[in-house]
């Protein structure tokens, strides 16, 4: 267990956490404020990655790719919300689950039709394609960029929620959505804005994840499950919970996958450790979630009521 | 005065910055009909919610038959013998009136595992359900779907569901809410018939009914008891006049 | 309203009886016309119908939106697969292990999941099921991602044999029929009424004196066990156990079947499974990209299917629309 490996993995975990946070923040608000189960959130992440990859391939500018991804997912998100999802606000969670499930299948296949089933390669921007020296070892500069951008977004979101009027509406809605609409606020507009914000962040997340994870159909599905774990651990409707939850999940999952098998080999026979190690490691964040649920069902940082 | 069957000591409940129950002491004597009145927002329904356990107090204790039930979950309190009806009708809309009351009876008739008998053939549930419906005057509508009942019939059903388990204490939250003239009269007769047979805590706004039926009246204002005693004492109380009618009428 | 009130002449009852008889006759008809394909198609429908019926217990009658039922398909399938791998092909042992594991997993996850409700419950069941998917993928010695081939079907000894497709068909049909009948009895008895009550008005149920949690967990366990048995059938049907059986989209498929057929109806899950499987079969024959059509179809189902196909039939016939008659 070298220091080098630990720090590298911790940074990787941080970077994964930041990607998760961008997704979790948007989704937790939709769940908590709008009380709407949007399983298709992962699809927006996937679309963001694809649009970014396509724009980057054509324009050779990462910035153009970024703008395209964010605006593209924002547009798609708002259009889908207004045309399809809006009809389901009044419906129960069951119908919402079903409808967004159908959307996932649709988007996964649509992407397969347009871009094919094989993963699309997306390289990091030229300015960040190298490594930098950090505390005596090298680390890819692009991943540092991801961490920095993610933390900046977290900061920006914090400012938005705690220091603007829009943010106040969101916080009010998270604690008592009915009250907000009774107070005469155009709740449909707020919903669209909230949804759009979530979509844009999902697109940004997809953009940044593109060069690191592979861009392929269904890439949003597994990430969605991890995002769900983040939200449950953090507390539904809580952006603060999404932040800490994402970092916890990101680091635990990344570091756990490397160290748990190693740890097991210390205490158990090699064949057992080799079999059980990866299995347990993949289950780690879910077991963590189960423990949190058993002890604090409302999450670690619940949106205050 | 015999020992209270249900009582609270120092009951306190806050909703954010709002103090809804303010160090409330409340006693219910077995066999009495104890009315709770007060202006809107006085915390009457919140008191009922805390007594039944649907709301946890921030401070204070609740005792039933000498034991502390403050931490007891709602269903346990119901099984001990505390039953409530709701101000806003809370029934099972897809079930018939009879099925609604039979379900209420089922909760107090042992467990629900292991039985394959259709409930309509369970004498132990159907008989008390029919009796309760008869008592509240809803027998004619026993096979009507609850969703299709008129408002007054809903209130009758509410009461039947609370009664059927023969509770030791009945907490009635505005049983006459939203009722018109004729409906009210039969409900008043029904409430009068409960007197002596059940211990009743009655939250109501209709003063005529309250003063006609109550053995004791507690007046709540801003979560605090400002007066508690016989109807005569309450009628004469200056504090009560002040609370309801304002300063001008309080003096003299 | 209940068993004794059911008139033998009611068109719906006759339709159901005819439907079940037709199902029983499928292998015979299929053999007669020399097309064994229909037996396999309907076996598939029966297996998913069984799984959907199990889901309907907690989802339709209990109001608990479990998005993780595919997990139990996997438990059943891997019970057969792993035991077979190690040389145990006795069907009764497969069955006991399936039931024990399904019961254990559903009990533990049920206890944890029932601490939440609404959105949280849906997402947690989803997460737990996916956890087992990843577990399956990581079990390299049992095939991992590629799955596990099962050399020989479960051996149920002298009683009956499912080594042939017809035998398996009738076992599946028998289990489906038994489950539907028992569900019908269950729904009209105390436990079923309790469950319906919790779906309709949970708060009142507690105030009435019901210890709701234990019944919800119990229903969840029963549901998980039945779904586990469906998984056992599935593994025998395909001679294969795979993590893909537990993938979350399969859970979604089961929900679609329940809604399509009609929530909280007895025959609904089977009807829904039939329509959905046939729809999938037809669409996938038409184009390789059939999911791009199925997706929007599912959205439409969510939008329009209020009572489901079988539910519509019920509503039209019944003079008592509020009753949850089968």
Image: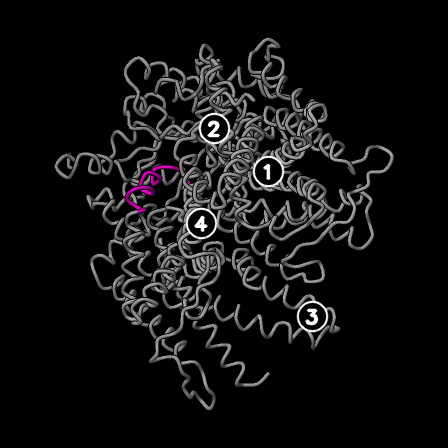
Q: Which chain letter goes with mark 3?
A: A
The residue that label 1 is drawn on is C215
Label 4 CA crowd tier, 10 Å (few <14, some 14–19, many 20+): many
Given residues B59 and A141, the one toward you in this image is A141
Q: Which chain letter goes with mark 1?
A: C
Mark 1 vs mark 4, CA separation in Å: 40 Å
The location of residue A283, given as percent across then percent down, is 59, 61
Given residues A35 and C181, the one toward you in this image is C181
Task: Please state the extent of the stretch shown in magenta in the rendering.
Answer: A80-93
The numbered disc on residue A163 is none
User: From the viewer's perspective, is A55 left or right of A210?
Assistant: left
Check if residue B46 falls in the magenta segment.
no
Nearest to viewer (mark 1 / mark 4) = 4
The numbered disc on residue A109 is 4
Mark 4 vs mark 2, CA separation in Å: 26 Å
Mark 3 vs mark 4, CA separation in Å: 36 Å
The residue that label 2 is drawn on is C308
**Image: C117 above or below B99:** below
Quadrant where the N terminus of chain C sits is top right
The residue that label 3 is drawn on is A274
Label 1 CA crowd tier, 10 Å (few <14, some 14–19, many 20+): many
Nearest to viewer (mark 1 / mark 2) = 2
The location of residue C120, given as percent across then percent down, is 46, 49
């Amino acid at each position: 267990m070298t220091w080098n490996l630990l720090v590298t993995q911790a940074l990787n975990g941080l970077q994964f956490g930041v990607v998760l946070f961008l997704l979790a923040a948007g989704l937790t608000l939709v769940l908590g404020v709008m009380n709407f189960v949007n399983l298709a959130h992962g699809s927006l992440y996937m679309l963001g990655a694809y649009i970014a990859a396509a724009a980057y391939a054509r324009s050779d500018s990462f910035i153009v790719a970024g703008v395209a991804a964010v605006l593209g997912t924002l547009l798609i998100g708002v259009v889908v919300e207004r045309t399809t999802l809006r009809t389901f606000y009044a419906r129960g969670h069951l119908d919402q689950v079903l409808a967004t499930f159908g959307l996932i299948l649709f988007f996964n296949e649509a992407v397969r039709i347009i871009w094919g089933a094989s993963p699309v390669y997306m390289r990091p921007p030229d300015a960040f394609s190298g490594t930098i020296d950090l505390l005596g070892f090298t680390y890819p500069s692009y991943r540092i960029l991801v961490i920095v951008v993610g933390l900046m977004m977290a900061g920006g979101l914090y400012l938005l929620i705690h220091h603007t009027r829009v943010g106040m509406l969101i916080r009010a809605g998270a604690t008592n959505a009915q009250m907000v609409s009774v107070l005469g606020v155009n709740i449909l507009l707020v919903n669209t804005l909230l949804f759009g914000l979530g979509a844009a962040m999902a697109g940004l997340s997809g953009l940044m994840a593109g060069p690191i994870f592979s861009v392929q159909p269904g890439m949003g599905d597994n990430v969605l499950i991890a995002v769900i774990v983040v939200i449950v651990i953090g507390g539904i409707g809580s952006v603060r919970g999404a932040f800490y939850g994402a970092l916890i999940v990101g680091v635990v999952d990344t570091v756990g996958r490397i160290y748990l098998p190693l740890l097991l080999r210390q205490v158990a026979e090699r064949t057992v450790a080799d079999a059980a190690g990866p299995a347990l490691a993949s289950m780690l964040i879910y077991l963590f979630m189960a423990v949190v649920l058993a002890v604090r069902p409302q999450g670690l940082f619940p949106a205050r009521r | 005065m015999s020992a209270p069957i249900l009582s609270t000591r120092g009951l306190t409940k806050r909703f954010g910055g709002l103090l809804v129950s303010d160090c409330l002491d409340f006693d219910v004597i077995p066999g009495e009909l104890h009315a709770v009145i007060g202006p809107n927002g006085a915390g009457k329904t919140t008191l009922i919610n805390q007594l039944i356990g649907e709301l946890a107090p921030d401070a204070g204790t609740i005792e039933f038959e000498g034991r502390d039930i403050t931490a007891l979950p709602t269903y346990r309190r119901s099984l001990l013998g505390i039953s409530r009806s709701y101000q806003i009708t809370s029934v099972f809309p897809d079930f018939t009136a009879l099925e609604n009351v039979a379900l209420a009876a089922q909760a107090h008739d042992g467990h629900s595992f292991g039985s394959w008998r259709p409930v309509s053939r369970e004498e132990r549930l159907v008989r008390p359900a029919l009796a309760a419906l008869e008592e509240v005057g809803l027998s004619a509508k026993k096979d009507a779907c609850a969703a299709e009942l008129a408002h007054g019939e809903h209130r009758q059903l509410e009461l039947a569901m609370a009664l059927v388990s023969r509770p030791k204490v009945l907490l009635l939250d505005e049983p006459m809410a939203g009722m018109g003239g004729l409906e009210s009269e039969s409900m008043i007769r029904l409430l009068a018939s409960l007197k002596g047979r059940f211990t009743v805590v009655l939250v109501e706004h209709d003063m005529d009914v309250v003063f006609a039926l109550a053995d004791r009246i507690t007046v709540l204002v801003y979560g605090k008891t400002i007066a508690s005693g016989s109807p005569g004492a309450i009628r004469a109380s200056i504090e009560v006049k002040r609370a309801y009618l304002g300063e001008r009428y309080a003096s003299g | 309203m209940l068993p004794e009130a059911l008139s033998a002449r009611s068109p719906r009852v006759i339709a159901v009886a005819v439907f079940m008889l037709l199902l029983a006759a499928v292998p015979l008809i299929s053999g007669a016309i020399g097309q064994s394909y229909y037996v396999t198609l309907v076996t598939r429908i029966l297996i998913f119908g069984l799984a959907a019926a199990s889901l309907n217990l907690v989802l339709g009658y209990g109001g608990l939106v479990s998005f993780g039922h595919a997990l139990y398909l996997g438990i059943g399938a891997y019970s057969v697969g792993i035991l077979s791998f190690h040389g145990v092909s006795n069907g009764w042992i497969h069955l006991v292990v399936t039931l024990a594991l399904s019961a254990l997993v559903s009990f533990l996850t049920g206890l944890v999941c029932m601490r939440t409700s609404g959105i949280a419950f849906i997402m947690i069941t989803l997460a737990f099921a996916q956890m087992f998917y990843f577990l399956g993928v990581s079990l390299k010695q049992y095939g991992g991602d590629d799955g596990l081939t099962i050399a020989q079907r479960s051996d149920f000894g002298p009683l009956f044999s499912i080594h042939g497709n017809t035998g398996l068909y009738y076992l599946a049909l028998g289990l489906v029929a038994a489950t539907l009948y028992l569900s019908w009895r269950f729904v009209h008895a105390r436990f079923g009424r309790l469950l319906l009550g919790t779906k309709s008005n949970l708060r009142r149920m507690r105030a009435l004196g019901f210890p709701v949690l234990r019944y919800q967990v119990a229903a969840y366990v029963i549901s998980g066990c039945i779904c586990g048995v469906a998984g056992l059938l599935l593994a025998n049907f395909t001679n294969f156990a795979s993590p893909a059986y537990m993938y979350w989209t399969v859970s979604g498929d089961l929900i679609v079947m329940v809604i399509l057929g009609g929530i909280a109806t007895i025959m609904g899950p089977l009807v829904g499974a039939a329509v959905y499987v046939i729809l999938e079969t037809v669409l996938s024959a038409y184009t390789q990209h059939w999911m791009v059509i199925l997706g929007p179809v599912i959205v439409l189902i969510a939008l329009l299917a209020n009572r489901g196909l079988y539910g519509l039939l019920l509503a039209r016939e019944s003079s008592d629309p509020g009753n949850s008659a089968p």
